Amino acid sequence: MLILPIRAAILYLLVVLIIRIMGKHQIGQLQPYELVITILISELAAVPMQDTDIPLINGIIPILTLLLIQVTLSFISLKSAAARLVICGGPSVLIENGKIVERELSRLRYNLTDLLEQLRLKDVPNIADVEYAILETSGKLSIIPKSQKRPVTPADLQIATPYEGLPTTLIEDGAVNKRHLAKANLNEDWLLRQVQKAGLTGFQDVFLASLDTAGQLYIQPKTKPGRAS
């Protein structure tokens, strides 16, 4: 009875490892060949996972072969623009200067209803407000509004703004992130004093502590059992 969960665990870990090697992409960002390989890998893993009569190696070898193909195609497309155009295709302009490019819609079999829906989802209901709408190789629609229709930015108003970076997490669920603490040129003694100033006993009482780029420390205590958050 243990053979099924063991086979399932081995194949699961193998597929997770392969997906990690393939890179961090959302499903909507996968190139066509990456999506095909991902689907094939899942199918190849499912067969030996369900049928114990099939040797495990018969599923592992094809999966590793697909990984090799994916890595090879990725390397080729990275080094050659011509190969990348063949493997991944190229972006297509669907709207140019506020005008729909009908020949591209026809060539891509992309209907007008879908185009208008994507524009609405991007908060651009009026085609006349669009400078360019580009269908990317991943299938996502990129929209560049006309300059008169873009939101006003501080740069447009010549307003200087302070630097805003990402907060640095110093404590997470009671555990001190020593690497982040050292990067901020701080130590645990200083951090403990700040925690105690917030009325807490020690690090174990902190759910989250983060330091923003202005030097402000945010501390959220853990919720005690039986007390509403």
Image (cartoon, rainbow, N blue to C red):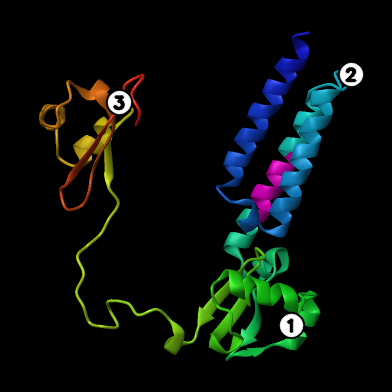
Question: How many circles with numbers are drawn on the protein?
Answer: 3
Decide which of 195, 214 is in the foreground and name it: 195
Above or below, 115 relative to 73: below
Evaluate whether residue 176 shows in this view.
no
Residue at horizontal 70 percent and vertical 69 percent from the top: 89
- Residue 63 in view in this figure: yes
Marker disc for residue 104: 1
Q: How far across and down, in percent of the image, does residue 214 sit? A: 16, 53
Q: Are marks 1 and 3 in contact (CB under 8 Å)?
A: no
State the residue at coordinates (58%, 51%): 25
104 lies above or below 72: below
**Prevailing secondary structure of the magenta residues:** helix
Give the extent of the magenta segment: 65-73
Residue 30 position (above or below residue 203): below
Location of residue 74 by image quarter: bottom right
x and y percent of residue 141 in the render? 62, 71
Q: In which quarter of the image is the C terminus?
A: top left
Q: Which mark is residue 53?
A: 2
* Image side of residue 33 versus residue 174, left or right: right
Q: Which of marks 1 and 3 is nearer the N terminus?
A: 1
Disc 2 is placed on an element classified as loop
Label 1 is placed on what type of residue?
Glu
